[in-house]
Each structure stands twice: as structure tokens, then as C-alpha cells.
Amino acid sequence: MTGRRSALLIATSRYENRALQQLRSPVRDVEGLTEVLQDQRIGDFQVTAVVDGRHYEINRAVEQFFLERSRRDFLLLHISCHGILNNYGELYFAARDTDRKLLGATAVSSTYLRTQMDRCRARSIVVLLDCCYSGAFLRGGKGDTEVHVAEELAGHGRAILTATNHTEYAWEGNLLDELDPEPSRFTGAIIEGLRSGEADGDRDGRVSVQDLYEYVCEQMRADHVAQSPQLSAEVENKLWVAHSLLNARHEKKGQMLDRGRMTEATFPQEWVGRRLAVGFAELVGFTRLTRRLNEEELGELVEIFQTAAADLVSAHGGQLIKTLGDEVRYAADDAGAAAEIALRLIETMESHESMPELGLRVGIAFGTVTTRMGDVFGTTVSLASALRSLAPIDAALVDSAFTQELIHTGEAPASEAETAEAAAEKEPPTYRFVLQPMWQRPVRELGQVQPWVLARRANSCG
């Protein structure tokens, strides 16, 4: 049973105190975030908003939001307003009726917000703070600045993403027309990243807090905005904020196969701890061709690739999980089948007359995953994606667990000595594959990874 996904958006643009400048962006922040968070294809949140509320109205909404929650609930809180530091360096969020001289009595204290979070039973809480000095909220936190990833999908913990550090201002949007304001630079980047799916940096189909943070930072740097977004997270697993719409975007461009021709995944709706081989296959050089070929020509190349992948996956008992333009994700219960699919796909693309300028690289990992609604999630999936990125052109890289599985099932030799002994025997060896270790590589969030080059045994046709 899954919990509720609830979001509370607090935005204050109008201020009664003349010492506080009126803001234009918060109202657009709420409108844009509500759109993407409520969208069932993206955030699938139930959204509540408090716009231009008085301090007691905001305090009441915050306490009610965190009250009587179950451990499975996923909560997202966004605050867009003036952030004010008192003489002791304590952060307050300005409300409509805030008096700068009476912050304790008329503003929303960050201490109050943290107390409500600490008392909440929900294990998954994400806070997005878009205000000046918002980084000051992190100084009393328990978390560090790195997200630690564990094996399961059902991530939980607390993550706080702020627009600035504890000394910076938060900037509004470029368009300062009061009749047509833009979202703030920080929240605007979040909205665009979720709406387009571009925040899904590792292209695993979902946007985690870490994905969102990295995307926002990249946008700030690209736009030369003098803000330093901060992330503090104390989590056991990845916190998934939203689904990625990149897949749907490619479909609209005509670069996807007709779904009627795809092999449908037959995983149960939810299965935690299932052991599978997960493979990522990606065309190399496709982006370069997008500058030279038209949409129809690109679509034909993608169809050739995806048709070959679908046929091979189906023929060897695997499951085609997802296609995304020039990338295919698949899974198989048997490591040997996953290896055969990878190598045959590379061989097919190498020999196809329409693919002379394109290469293929594949990454495969073996381990426990969570299957849900036909998709697979977990560290094994992230590792397979990372190995795909490390793989040379027209080659497949696998992880150590996959290597051991091939050895255990007799599909690969346990050592070079065994390979030499087999070569000396008159009877041909029974294994189909050979493996060559590469140098260990550091991979973000996964530590040191030992890749192995997967190849077919000489004179083996599979």
C-alpha cells in the first residue's frame, strides 16, 4: 500500500509593511508548480496553496499539513516569499502582515517549520525554499550535503533544497511586468525541469531530489545568476519527486515505435527484491545526426534500432522495459539471456546497412530491483545506466555481480587459466562468453565500480 502524495505551496507577493518590497514572481511560482505537481504524468500530488496569507494563516496551514500523516506519505512543501534574518541570524519567512520590527510575532519562524517537520510521522519530506538567505535554514539541520543511495526504490528521509546560501538574495524572473510576471529564477528552473523532463539527468525515467538539484544548479550557471542553490539531505534511499516526460516528448516528435509493436513488460504491479539482469543499450552518434537529418529520417533510424531490440529481447525471453528515442532498457531473469541480447544487438547494428555512422554501447548489471507498473527501479538500474555511459563504442560492460552470475551458471570461465585449459581440450568448451576486467571507475552515488568487458567466446554463435 502506497501513501498519499501531498504538496503545500506557500507564496507571498503582497506585503502591508512598506519596509517589504512587493514581489511579482511568487504568484507565478504557485501557478507553475501546481500545474506540474498535479499532473498525474509528472508529480501526481494533491496540491494545496496559501497565497498572500497572514502569518497565523500560514502557521496553521503548515501545522495542519504535517499533522496526522502516515509513514508512507510523501510530502512536498514549497515557500516563495521574502526571507528575513534577525540580528541573531535566525531566518523568518515574511507573511502579508509581517512587521520587520516584530518578526517573532508577525512572521513564520524557520524554527517553527523545522519543529513541525521533526514531529511529522511521514518518512519522505521534501522542502523547497525560494527566498533570500534560505540557506540559513540548513545551518541547524542534521543532514549533510550528499544524498546517500541504498538498494530499494521506496526512498525515504528529509531533503531541503534552497534557492541560495545563507548570505545571498534570491532573484525574481527576467520579465518584471507586473501584469505578466515570470516565476523566480530558482522555482522557474524547477518548473521547467519537471515539465520538460530534462531534470531527469540519468534518464532513468524519474526525477530524484538529487537530479532536481543538479539541474537547477546547471540552469543557474548557464544563466549567470548570482545564486548558489544548496541541498541538504538525510535519506536512506533516493527520493523520487516526479516522473519524467521525456518519453512522451519523443513520442510526439515521431521518434518512437508504434506501441503495438513493442514487447510489453509482464512484471507484477509491484515486486520488491526481485533479482534481475537489467540492460541499457544506446546508439552512439545519434545526437550528431540530428543536426543533419530531418525528423522522418531520424524516425526511421530509431525504428530500425527499436524493432531489432524488441525482436531480440522477445526471442531470448527478456522484457522490453522502456524505449526513449535512441535508448532501450530491458531486463531478463537469466544473465546468459541478457548477455546474448546485448551482443546480438551490437552485431545487428554493426552489420545493418542503414547504420554506418552509428555505434552502440550497452551496460548490464545484475541484482535486486523493485518492479512497479511494468518498470524497474533500484541501484541495479542506476549501475546499469552508469556502465552504459562508460562502455566503449560497440561494446558491452557488465558489473561484478553479473560476471559472477555468468560464471555460476557456466556461461563464462572463472579464470584465464580455465580459458587456456578449454582451448587445449579437443572438446569445445560449454561456455558462451568471456569477460575481461577493466580499471575500477568512480561513479557518483555508487562509489568504485568494477566494469567487465563482455564478449562472445571465439567460434561461439550463441
Image (tube, rainbow, N blue to C red):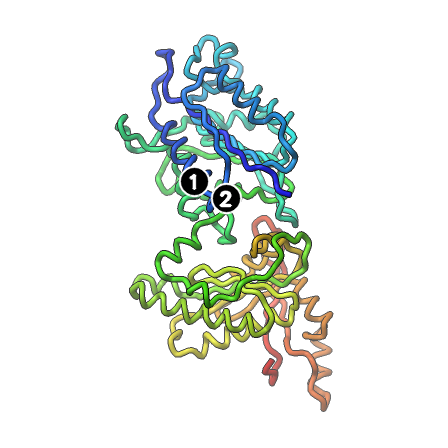
What is the x, y in percent for residue 109? 53, 18
Residue 73, image x, y percentages: 60, 36
Label disc, if present, on residue 242 of the rendered structure: 2
**Dot 2 surroundings within 10 Å: few (below 14), some, or many (20 or more)?**
many
Choose top left, top right, bottom left or bottom right for residue 422: bottom right
Inspect the image, locate mark 1, and give the three-letter code of the amino acid beneath it: Val
Residue at coordinates 48% horizontally, 33% vertically from top-left? 47
* Badge count: 2
Quarter that holds the C terminus = bottom right
Q: Is residue 307 left or right of residue 69?
A: left
Residue 90: in sight, yes or no? Answer: no
Taking 72 as reference, is 345 left or right? left
Q: Residue at x 53, y 75 (%)?
A: 344
The circle on residue 318 is none
Give the residue displayed 52% in from the left and 18% down from the top. Answer: 59
Whole-percent x, y for residue 260 in the image: 45, 65
Q: Nearer the viewer, residue 387 or 317?
A: 317
| Circle 1 Cα neighbour tier, 10 Å, few/some/many (<14 / 14–19 / ≥20) | many
Compute the Cα span from label 2 to label 1: 9 Å
Label 2: state its secondary structure: strand
Is the C-beta separation of discs 2 and 1 under 8 Å? Answer: yes
Q: Amino acid at mark 2?
A: Ala
Residue 112 point in image, percent of width and height = 57, 19
Which residue matches tag 1?
36
Q: Which quadrant of the structure image shows residue 75? A: top right
Quadrant containing the N terminus is: top right
Q: Quadrant of residue 374?
A: bottom right
Q: Is residue 43 above or below residue 52?
A: below
